[in-house]
Image: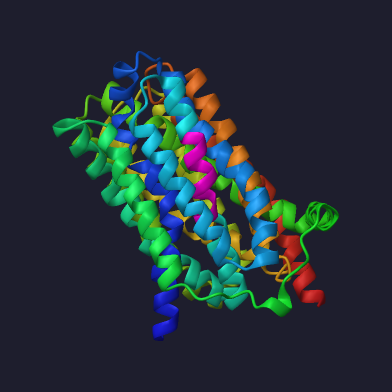
């Protein structure tokens, strides 16, 4: 690995982690926030859903802007807005205030979640791009492993409000990294004039590409499966199984290790199997494992260790899918990589927000709704993949 490759992985990984950190760090505090602000579980979970919706909406703007003005300027704006939203959340006197602050924070976070994918497409394609995407996931693995630990520590020894102040500081670090380290990868001669008609035509072109849309929804439902875990895990582990916030953070980290570790194999497996066959195999594996876990859960096997072990093995398959479908979705759209990245992210997060809302609405105090959503999303991703991925192989062979 050369120095430039490693530096790109570190910087882009840290920028991409800004959004997940804003989610993972406050997950252990959700039950405490609900009590402190006098809100129900479903309304408190809405602070996750509105964050996803803001990220989804903001990407529609950031993507074309980055194609027209370069990758760095929208990152400056996004990181600053992210920090402002986090400070607002820290001062929230009501759940409504908190939800609004999360919306502002999400509008800023989506810059760091959208533009790094476009930067990768500017620099690499194929297995090399998948490898860099996996390395970025390794860098931001600090989020699911350390963020809940920090959040639970602040919840136990201080206040959940300090979580958002820490998140604001992370946004400022992202701003500094963008200014001092990240190089512009969209040269002026490759930029597209920004006007409403051009933006609309760009999105319509993508929506007419059935393969792009199909692969995007493979990624959307695969990631929504993980979002279902994000939305329900704190209530299931803490309220249902009786774990402390710190124990929950450790359980959350364990469930993330397989996802992150498997993702590092995407470049190696992608070169040997091809990205599309690898994704198909990983989706099959994921559906089998999550379906078995669902059967155990419905049968009344209410054991936290069974749940943790099942999710550990399941998320290993998901770790091969997520970085690879990101690359596959953008590989034919290098000229409008920012726009393609934005639409990919928007469709993925709108799907995730709907799943989060459903999990919150049907939560019954047990693990059943969460596990059902995890397995159900995996099945949908598998079915869409079976239709889409072979067609991509046929197109590639014909070319």
Task: Judge whether residue 397 can be spotted in this image.
Answer: yes
What segment carries the magenta color?
A: 102-112
| Between 5 and 385, the one nearer to me in the picture | 5
Q: Position of residue 231 (x, y in %)?
A: 43, 32
| Between 227 and 64, the one nearer to me in the picture | 64
Q: Position of residue 149 (x, y in %)?
A: 23, 44
Question: What is the quadrant of the N terminus in the image?
Answer: bottom left
Identify the residue at image location x=18%, y=38%.
Answer: 153
Q: Position of residue 144 (x, y in %)?
A: 34, 49
Give the side of residue 352 with respect to residue 207, left or right.
left
Identify the residue at image location x=41%, y=30%.
Answer: 232
Q: Main secondary structure of the magenta part?
A: helix
Q: Relative to residue 46, is residue 11 depicted above or below? A: below
Identify the residue at image location x=47%, y=41%.
Answer: 105
Q: Quadrant of residue 137?
A: bottom left
Q: Relative to residue 337, is residue 1 depicted above or below? A: below
Q: Position of residue 242 (x, y in %)?
A: 22, 24
Give the side of residue 171 with respect to residue 321, left or right.
left
Q: Quadrant of residue 316?
A: bottom left
Q: How is the image coloured?
A: rainbow
Task: Judge whether residue 135 can be spotted in this image.
Answer: no
Question: What is the quadrant of the C terminus in the image?
Answer: bottom right
């Amino acid at each position: 690995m050369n120095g430039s490759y490693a530096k790109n992985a570190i910087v882009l990984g840290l920028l991409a982690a800004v959004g997940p950190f804003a989610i993972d760090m406050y997950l252990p505090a959700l039950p405490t926030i609900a009590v402190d602000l006098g809100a129900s579980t479903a309304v408190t979970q809405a602070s996750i859903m509105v964050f996803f919706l803001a990220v989804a909406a903001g990407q529609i703007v950031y993507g074309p802007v980055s194609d027209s003005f370069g990758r760095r300027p929208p990152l400056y704006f996004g990181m600053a807005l992210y920090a402002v939203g986090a400070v607002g959340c820290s001062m929230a006197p009501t759940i409504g205030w908190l939800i609004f602050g999360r919306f502002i924070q999400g509008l800023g976070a989506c810059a760091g979640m959208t533009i790094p994918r476009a930067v990768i497409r500017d620099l690499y394609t194929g297995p090399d791009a998948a490898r860099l995407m996996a390395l970025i996931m390794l860098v931001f693995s600090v989020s699911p492993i350390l963020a809940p630990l920090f959040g639970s520590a602040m919840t136990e020894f201080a206040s959940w409000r300090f979580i958002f102040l820490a998140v604001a500081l992370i946004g400022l670090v992202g701003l500094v990294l963008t200014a001092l380290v990240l190089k512009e990868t969209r040269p002026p001669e490759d930029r597209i004039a920004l006007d409403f008609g051009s933006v609309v035509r760009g999105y319509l072109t993508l929506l007419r590409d059935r393969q792009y849309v199909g692969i995007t929804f493979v990624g959307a439902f695969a990631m929504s499966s993980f979002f279902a875990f994000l939305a329900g895990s704190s209530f299931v582990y803490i309220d249902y199984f009786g774990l402390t916030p710190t124990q929950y953070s450790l359980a959350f980290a364990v469930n993330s290790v397989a996802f992150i570790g498997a993702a590092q194999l995407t470049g190696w497996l992608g070169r040997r199997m091809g990205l599309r066959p690898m994704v198909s195999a990983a989706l099959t594996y994921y559906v089998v494992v999550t379906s078995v876990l669902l059967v155990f859960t419905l049968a009344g096997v209410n054991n936290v260790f069974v749940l943790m072990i099942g999710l550990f093995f399941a998320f290993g398959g998901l770790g091969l899918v997520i970085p690879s479908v990101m690359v596959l979705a953008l590989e034919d759209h290098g000229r409008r990589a920012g726009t393609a990245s934005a639409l990919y992210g928007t469709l993925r997060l709108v799907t995730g927000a709907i799943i989060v809302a459903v999990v919150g609405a049907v939560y019954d105090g047990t693990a059943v709704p969460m596990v059902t959503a995890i397995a159900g999303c995996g099945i949908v991703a598998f079915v869409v993949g079976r239709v889409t991925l072979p067609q991509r192989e046929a197109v590639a062979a014909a070319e």
